[in-house]
Each structure stands twice: as C-alpha cells, then as structure tokens.
Image: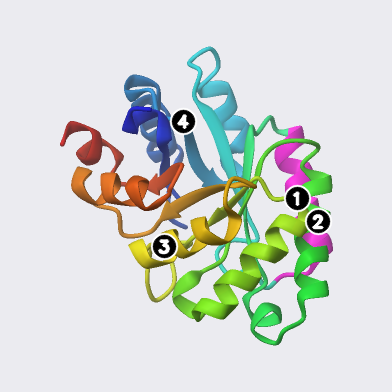
C-alpha cells in the first residue's frame, strides 16, 4: 500500500479555524489520504467538504488527555457518528492504566466502541508516559474492549511515536488489530520506518512533505 493511503492528515490545534480545516480537507482529497484527523466540532464540516472524494474523517475524542468521564467520551463518540464520522480516535485513561485498574480501562474503551456503532475505534495509549509492561497491558485491554487499532501518541504529550513502541505493540497484538503511529513523523524516511516496524496507519501534520519526499 502506498504511503498516501496510510495517512491520517491531521490538524488538532486548538486555534484551528474553518479556513485551516478547509485547507486540510482539500489537501487530503488532492493527495488521496486515508482520512483527515480533527477535533469533534469540525466533523460535520469535514464530512460535507470531503463528500465524494473517498477520504474519510477521523474524529478525536477525549482529546488530548483521555481523563474525562467515560459517559462524556461515549457522548462525544455518539455525536461524531451523528455528524457522519467514519473513524474515531480516543485517548485511553492513562492514570487508570498506570494504577493497574484494567477493568476501568476496558470499560472506558468498550463504551466508546459501543457508541461508535461499528465505526473503527483507534485507542491512543500515549506511550511516552508508559513503560513496556504498561504498553503491553494497554494493548491487551484494547483487544478485550474491541478496538480496531492501537495508536502510539496524541502528539501533544512529552513524546511521539518510536520504532520500539510500534514494534512492541505489533508483537503484542499480532494480527488481532491494527496499529497507528502518530507524533513526530516528519519525513518519508521516518514514515517508511514506522511502516516497516508494524504501523498500518500514520497520523501526521507533515503529510505532504512525507508523500512528496
């Protein structure tokens, strides 16, 4: 699969304007990216802008901290589906995971998966805040909860995707779900290395620089 079709073209900045989102959508359509990855208030706008282009919409919920109430995350997911999203990226509850409260983590993800009504849910682990044991456990929780993808990072914390984390995630999930690498992927060489390590999808705001090499 060519890189274009693996990319979620991303703008999650809190000061992103309608003009910024229009540009994002038009670039995604022009380059044949998989989806645009955006905050929830822009979902309906992006769906309408991208109609007929074949480009999907990834709505990010519980973003970027993942520490909101489960009911709030599920509500965001339901609204995203109503607004026409094709995929959902959610942030895991990092603190609950570190505490070892896997039941909470699994339920938190499960409720979003239910609310997503069959749309793929990608679960962001925020690997830079976790050790290897916690990353493995997070992946296992995601599988139990029905996630379609495990994802490395929000890009808003202390670090982004690393080859080590992607390889560890692939080793843990096998073929049971897909992997999205995001955060700090700036060029084609880095993107190809992530794919080689096991990433099925890439989240980046440097999409055009990557595909134009």
Marks 2/3: CA–CA distance = 24 Å
From mark 4 to mark 3, how far is it between C-alphas?
Answer: 19 Å
Q: Nearer the viewer, residue 66 or 162?
A: 162
Instruction: List the residue tagged with mark 3.
Output: 155
Residue drawn at 41 percent across, 55 percent down: 182
Residue drawn at point x = 67 percent, y = 78 percent = 97
Whichever of labels 1 and 4 marks the residue nearer the N terminus, that label is 4
The residue singled out by tag 4 in the image is 34
Residue 162 seen in the current view: no
x, y (%) of residue 193? 28, 50
The CA distance from mark 1 to mark 4 is 21 Å
Q: Quadrant of residue 24?
A: top left
In which image quadrant can residue 165 be found?
A: bottom left
Crowding near the residue tagged with mark 2, few <14, some 14–19, many ≥20 C-alpha atoms within 10 Å: many
* Nearer the camera: disc 1 or disc 3: 1
Q: The N terminus is located in which quarter?
A: top left
Q: Which numbered disc covers residue 146?
A: 1
Residue 141 x/y as whole percent: 72, 65
Q: Nearer the viewer, mark 2 or mark 3?
A: 2
**Residues in magenta, as a range:** 68-82
Q: Earlier in the sequence, mark 2 or mark 4?
A: 4
- Which residue, given by chain and number where applicable, does mark 2 sit on? 110
Position of 204 with respect to 210 (left or right) is right
Front disc: 2 or 1: 1
Whether the residues at callouts 2 and 3 have beta carbons within 8 Å, the answer is: no
């Amino acid at each position: 699969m060519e890189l274009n079709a693996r990319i979620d073209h991303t703008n999650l900045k809190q000061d992103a304007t309608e003009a910024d989102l229009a540009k994002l959508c038009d670039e995604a359509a022009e380059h044949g990216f998989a989806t645009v990855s955006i905050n929830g208030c822009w979902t309906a706008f992006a769906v309408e802008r991208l109609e007929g282009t074949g480009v999907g919409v990834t709505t990010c919920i519980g973003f970027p901290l993942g520490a909101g109430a489960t009911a709030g995350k599920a509500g965001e997911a339901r609204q995203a589906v109503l607004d026409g999203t094709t995929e959902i990226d959610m942030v895991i509850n990092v603190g609950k995971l570190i505490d070892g409260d896997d039941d909470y983590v699994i339920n938190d993800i499960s409720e979003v998966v239910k609310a997503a009504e069959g749309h793929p849910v990608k679960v962001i682990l925020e690997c830079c805040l976790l050790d290897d044991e916690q990353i493995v456990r997070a992946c296992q929780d995601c599988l139990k909860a029905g996630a379609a993808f495990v994802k490395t990072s929000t890009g808003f914390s202390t670090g982004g995707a690393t080859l080590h984390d992607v390889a560890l995630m692939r080793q843990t999930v096998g073929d049971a779900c897909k992997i999205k690498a995001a955060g700090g992927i700036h060029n084609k060489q880095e993107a190809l290395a992530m794919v080689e390590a096991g990433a099925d999808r890439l989240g980046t705001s440097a999409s055009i620089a990557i595909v134009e090499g």
